[in-house]
Amino acid sequence: MRILILSHNLIERGNYFRALKFASRLADKGHEVTFIPSSYRWYRTNRYKRGKVHVIESPSFSLVIGIDDGWSPLGILYRIWQVIRHRYDVVYGFSHKPVDFIPALFSRLFRGSFYVTDWCDWWGKGGLLTMIKKYRDADPNLSRVKKKILETYDRMEAVFEEFVPKRAGLVTVICKALEERAASLGIPGKRILKLVSGADTDTIRPGNKGDARNKTGLNAVLEQSSVGKKAVILGYTANYHLDEHLLLEAFSRVSRERKEARLLVVGPEFRVNPKLMKDWGLSVFDVASGERIGETDNIIHFGRRPFKQVPDFLAASDILLLPMTDILYNRGRWPHKIGDYLAAGRPVVVNDVGDIPDLIRDRNVGRIAAPEPGDFADKIVRLMDEKGNWDRYGKNARRIAETDLSWEKIAEKLHMRLLSLRGKKK
């Protein structure tokens, strides 16, 4: 089959990884797969191959909303041009965003393509859009006019989120909550397929801790601090810090009880008010500054890093943290980083929210904490005190990554469904 996969995200952001994995696995099955994510270059395309997948980065220019948000007029037009020029058997859009669903519907209506859409985040009805509005309202750099314009986009997105799945021939959902929501819209069960995100066990492997700390520069930082090699490194990676208050308040309690604890962060800067950080006894050391780490610095921030460097930061950690507050958005998603964490073969501490706890419950990979700072901190401290079990927990984590979260196993479910649809079409 000729398959087109569309992602509104920029390279190495958000759903890009999930879309690329399915593209790669379908290409491995012998299908001709083209993958179109958004380009960092606003108006130019970029063509190349990733393994057997043909990749075309489409233009992302947008007037008001961000270039990663899927509303680019140039992106929509370019992708429509692609489906006019080429006939695809399957078009798989990885969101309800206009750059994904408009070309996909166009291809279905005018070229006879089978349309698949992926639903992996809870946006409207109290989901992600509510959180985004809260951040915007607190941003002093956004004018009132721009906030109103962005809220208009949000209202349209809330409509599209439920409009798009109803128009697709198959809806893939990432978690149980979205599976139930799709069914509540009247979509028949035979048109819904639950596909979690897998673990990248090829790229991310359990590495030597000492080597990883040397390679990332963490050892050089620790040697300048009073804690030195006695530090227990709590690792955390993120594209966005949606649950930063839970993470930081819990770590504040941990650091007061265990002076050797250090939080290693790979991702953007935190938004928490500096005064609140000070009240929590937290101090961030920016590695990029090139300065010497201070005696009170207990958060080591490496900033955003290319994905190819992430495995080294995971390997440099003793324990990996996945904070999730008990909100609708978190119940309606599957954080991709859990696959990275488990593939890295490190113990984890997660909150009892959504589908992730059921994946690791009673499997000796770490701790599951209530979604509040006190219990989260308590579970982290308990795991810190179990140093003798870290290796065993890490091996169990890796085993889950290689079995339950095998991309080959997950993608095969999709492949078989697509083959059955092709058979019916014949």
Image: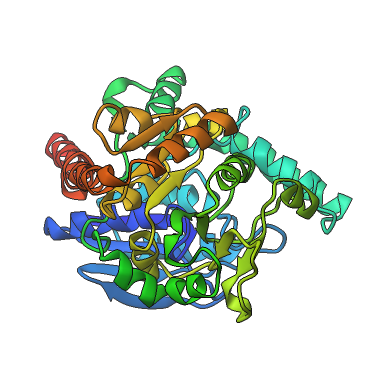
Protein image colouring = rainbow
Residue 299 appears left or right of 175: right
Q: Quadrant of residue 117?
A: top left
Looking at the image, residue 297 lies above or below residue 345: below
Query: Is residue 230 or residue 244 the one in the foreground?
Result: 230
> Is residue 5 in view?
no
- Residue 174, position in %: x, y? 37, 36
- Residue 222, position in %: x, y? 49, 70
Q: What is the quadrant of the C terminus in the image? A: top left
- Residue 176, position in %: x, y? 37, 26
Query: Is residue 313 or residue 231 the one in the foreground?
Result: 231
Figure disc tally: 0
Residue 313 appears left or right of 133: left
Looking at the image, residue 163 lies above or below residue 58: above
Q: Quadrant of residue 268?
A: bottom right
Q: What is the quadrant of the N terminus in the image? A: bottom left
Q: Residue furthest right?
A: 144
Residue 170 appears left or right of 266: left
> Is residue 330 in view?
yes
Looking at the image, residue 400 lies above or below residue 125: below
Looking at the image, residue 165 lies above or below residue 54: above
- Residue 247, position in %: x, y? 57, 43
Residue 46 appears left or right of 426: right
Q: Residue at x 42, y 66 (%)?
A: 229
Query: Is residue 235 or residue 355 the one in the foreground?
Result: 235
Q: Residue at x 37, y 76 (%)?
A: 214
Q: Residue at x 59, y 55 (%)?
A: 71
